[in-house]
Image: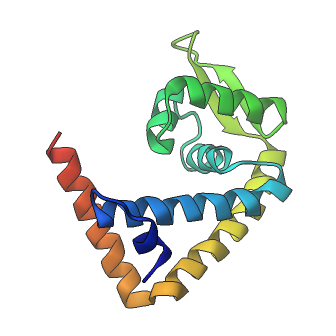
Amino acid sequence: MSIADERHTGGSPLGYAIKYAQHALRLRMDAALRPLGITTPQYSALTAIAAKPGISNAQLARQAFVTPQTMQAILAGLERDGLLIREPDPDHGRVLRSQISSQGAKVLASAQGVVSHIGQTLVEAVGEEQSAMLVEALNRAAEALARSE
């Protein structure tokens, strides 16, 4: 019996196992990213900005599963620490567009190595084939839940 089975007290065992795994992943990522001076949400923001420089705060918030207000605080911290540059959008003066600074790019490169190692640990735990099947199954589950709202 797994720890998730032992702690499960009702509802969906699958839902509990997903949340348990997500929590374990978040704790591991936070611990691994802490020496680099960033948090998991900051890593998520930097990754999204690197992929799409100038991405809006609202888009970043949706991708990181946080509120726009929370994303604003994340971005302010990254800017304060010199990892991010934010400039007003030329068409919408109140909108700030974000770009990674050179220091931010160095931190992100180090963080990507750390996160890649954690991802490999996940794949090794369940195997390549089961990992691919699990990703597919979780995507189907998320889509089913989104449709049932």
Vertical arrangement, residue 55 with respect to residue 127, above or below: above
Residue at the far left: name it: 148
Asked whether, in this view, residue 99 is left or right of residue 110, the answer is left
User: x%, y% of residue 75?
Assistant: 67, 31
Q: Quadrant of the C terminus?
A: top left
> Picture quarter containing residue 93?
top right
Along the line of sight, which residue is nearer the eye, 16 or 136?
16
> Picture quarter containing residue 52?
top right
Residue ID at (64%, 32%): 98
Residue ID at (39%, 64%): 8
Q: Quadrant of the N terminus?
A: bottom left
User: x%, y% of residue 111?
Assistant: 73, 61
User: x%, y% of residue 106?
Assistant: 81, 55
Along the line of sight, which residue is nearer the eye, 119 or 58?
119
Asked whether, in this view, residue 136 is left or right of residue 105, the answer is left
Vertical arrangement, residue 93 with respect to residue 49, above or below: above
Residue ID at (75%, 60%): 31
User: x%, y% of residue 51?
Assistant: 55, 50
